[in-house]
Amino acid sequence: MEEQYASQEQSDREGSHRRVKKKHTVPFQCMVSIPTGFQIQKPNTPKLVYDVSHLSMAKEMCKRVIDVEDCGQVEIDLHVLKIKGVLPFIVNVSIEPLHMEQVYTTSGRDTSLFLSCQETVYVDHILKYSVDHVPYYVIDGHHIQVRDVSIKGMEDNPQMAQISGVFYFDYA
């Protein structure tokens, strides 16, 4: 049985994300092993921490030939803005015991626990093309956002779950 849990924030914004261009996203995923006797807690909003300090902007220039009406082919300088580097992240998901009868904790009645996984996404992504010089942009959490985070139980192995989503580059 395949189950999928999406964060509430993601589902609230789902309509607006349908218009997001896939070219401005980099997908991520990681796997967690669920201990015997536990299940993913429902509802579940994974907590994700990511580090943008290993990313940098690169400006490149190349020549392109374009067709101009009534002039023929013209060679132009095309400026390219890229973001490059690595984007490490850690994700936490909460789990709970399947049966409560013989389960005890050191924290009162709260039996939820957290599992985490850590991965790194490699980024070499074109943000913009321009015939003019491209401006400098700040690399931060305002411009690099996490979207569409979901948890999916694996059908062939119920003790494994996949956490996936996308990093969205908001440099309009």
Image (spheres, rainbow, N blue to C red):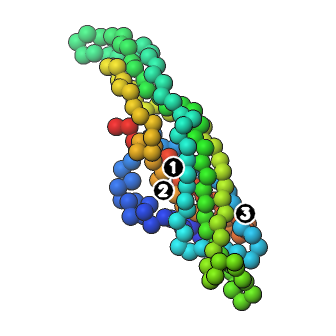
Residue 21 coordinates in the image, percent (x, y): 40, 44
Quick one: SS at disc 2?
Answer: strand
Disc on the earlier residue, 3 or 2: 3
Cα distance in 3D space between marks 1 and 2: 6 Å
User: How far apart are the two marked residues, 3 and 2, measured between alpha carbons?
Assistant: 21 Å
Amino acid type at mark 2:
Asp
Query: Which amino acid does the dot numbered 3 rest on?
Result: Ser
Which residue, given by chain and number where applicable, does mark 1 sit on?
166
Q: Quadrant of residue 74?
A: top left
Circle 2 sits on which residue? 148
Q: Is residue 25 above or below residue 83?
A: below
- Disc number for residue 33: 3
Number of disc labels = 3
Label 3: few (<14), some (14–19) or many (≥20) C-alpha neighbours in 10 Å: some
Mark 3 vs mark 1: which is more N-terminal? 3
Position in image of residue 108 (x %, y %): 64, 82
